[in-house]
Image (tube, coloured by chain):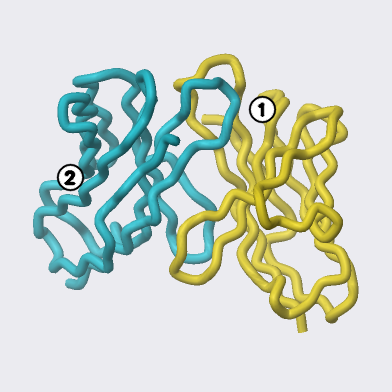
Chain colours: A cyan, B yellow
């Protein structure tokens, strides 16, 4: 079945460092791909998404490109801030509309000043 | 973007009592909602899919008699943890997603921290 694999954390960076969180997927057809962020004690917020191959999603300085040839959707940010400390989840939508998203296990990012 | 409101944000209850958690989609009709459970520093575990006007679909290993789900309207789903025990303490999150297209994102509630003492 469909699945998402993302790098395990925690990822610890200094402020202004470059961030990459790897995400690869297995799916039939052409899924849509998402990155969500979860701050402590809160629900998940959509960070960005891409719905077809070669699409680039971007938001708040974060970017991810839908690479069908490598089945990847890596999250990147050029210069992280302390406020970016959170848990990041990669997810995909299956073929059928209205079904639950399939999530990776999450990657904890900790940024220190 | 669409807003999903979850209430309460935290609750403490005595062992053996029941607790109800509400999930409302505020600006779109959600024929389908999802309930997740999250343990500390772990990913989301899908518990069940809540379908408006019909029975919920539970994931394997989730006790349907313990976690009662009701989806009485297009904007409200409730999760009732019956006869709660300390092992039910967890962070519960609801989600709603439009079924109009398969590329739409899911919207999440703020989560409910349940502590059973």
Residue at 37% across / 19% down in the picture? Answer: A29
Q: Which residue is located at x 69 percent, y 50 percent?
A: B6
Q: Position of residue A13 (x, y in %)?
A: 16, 66
Q: How many marks?
A: 2
Nearer the observer, A7 or B13: A7
Mark 1 → mark 2, Cα distance in angstroms: 31 Å
Reply above or below: A24 against B20: above
In the figure, residue B75 lies in which quadrant? top right
Residue topped by disc 1: B27
Residue sitting at x 44%, y 45%: A103
Q: Determine whether A19 is above or below B17 in the image.
A: above
Q: Residues within 10 Å of mark 2 (few under 14, many from 20)?
A: some
Question: Position of B87 compared to A1: left or right?
Answer: right
In the figure, is residue A31 to the left or right of B100?
Answer: left
Residue that carries the numbered disc 2 in the rendered image: A76
Q: Are marks 1 and 2 on the same chain?
A: no
Q: Are marks 1 and 2 in contact (CB under 8 Å)?
A: no
């Amino acid at each position: 079945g469909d699945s998402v694999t993302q790098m395990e954390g925690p990822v610890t960076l200094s402020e202004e460092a470059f961030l990459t969180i790897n995400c690869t997927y297995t799916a039939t057809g052409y899924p849509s791909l998402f990155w969500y962020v979860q701050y402590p004690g809160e629900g998940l917020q959509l960070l960005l998404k891409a719905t077809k191959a070669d699409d680039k999603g971007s938001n708040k300085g974060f970017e991810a490109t839908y690479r069908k040839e490598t089945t990847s959707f890596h999250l990147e940010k050029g210069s992280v801030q302390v406020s970016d400390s959170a848990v990041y989840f990669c997810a995909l939508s299956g073929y059928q509309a209205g079904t639950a998203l399939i999530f990776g296990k999450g990657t904890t990012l900790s940024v220190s000043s | 973007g669409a807003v999903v409101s979850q209430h309460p944000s935290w609750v403490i209850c005595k062992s053996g009592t029941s607790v109800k958690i509400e999930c409302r989609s505020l600006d779109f009709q959600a024929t389908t909602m999802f309930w997740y459970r999250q343990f500390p520093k772990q990913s989301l575990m899908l518990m069940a899919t809540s379908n408006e006007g019909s029975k919920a679909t539970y994931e394997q290993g989730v006790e349907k008699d313990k976690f009662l789900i009701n989806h009485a309207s297009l904007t409200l789903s409730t999760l009732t943890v019956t006869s709660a025990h300390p092992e039910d303490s967890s962070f519960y999150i609801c989600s709603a997603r439009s079924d109009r297209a398969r590329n739409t994102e899911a919207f999440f509630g703020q989560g409910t921290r349940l502590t059973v003492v």
